[in-house]
Image: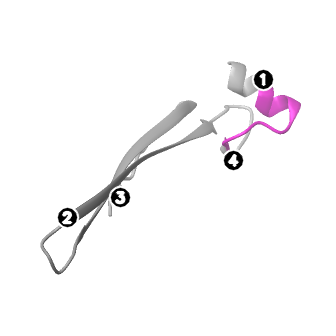
Amino acid sequence: TEHKTVVERDSRLFQAVAFHYAEIHDENDNIFSSQKLSANHLYVINSKFDQTPLGFTAPRTEAEKQWKNT
């Protein structure tokens, strides 16, 4: 498990990529493994015009669409 706290005052696009790995050993000492990559992102908007930060992954409103393009 990974955990990190990020303190940022400006608006940002945060992106994360993770590598997942699993391994199984059977009774004959055969090893089977599986790997997978996953990714996610988060837009965080800290506007001087709003008191509360705005966060979204997919823009739904016109304001969020404008922030995404900015």
The amino acid at mark 4 is: Thr
Alpha carbons under labels 2 and 4: distance apart: 51 Å
Q: Secondary structure at mark 3?
A: loop
x 42%, y 41%: residue: 17
Disc 2 target residue: 31
- Which quadrant would residue 49 be assigned to in this image? top right
Earlier along the polypeptide chain: callout 1 or callout 3?
3
Residue 59 belongs to magenta span:
yes
The magenta region covers 55-65
Front: mark 2 or 3: 2
Q: Quick check: 23 above or below 66? A: below
Disc 1 target residue: 66
Earlier along the polypeptide chain: callout 3 or callout 4?
3
Alpha carbons under labels 1 and 4: distance apart: 17 Å
Q: Nearer the viewer, residue 10 or 69?
A: 69
Seen from this angle, which residue lies furthest right? 62
- Number of callouts: 4
Alpha carbons under labels 3 and 4: distance apart: 24 Å
Seen from this angle, which residue lies furthest left? 29
Q: Quadrant of the N terminus?
A: bottom left
Kindly check if marks 1 and 4 are in contact, taking CB atoms under 8 A apart as contact: no
The amino acid at mark 1 is: Gln
Front: mark 2 or 4: 2
Seen from this angle, which residue lies furthest front? 28
Earlier along the polypeptide chain: callout 1 or callout 4?
4
Q: Quick check: 10 above or below 56? A: above
Give the x, y percent position of residue 12.
Answer: 54, 31
Disc 4 target residue: 52
Earlier along the polypeptide chain: callout 2 or callout 4?
2
Disc 3 target residue: 3
Give the x, y percent position of residue 42.
Answer: 58, 41
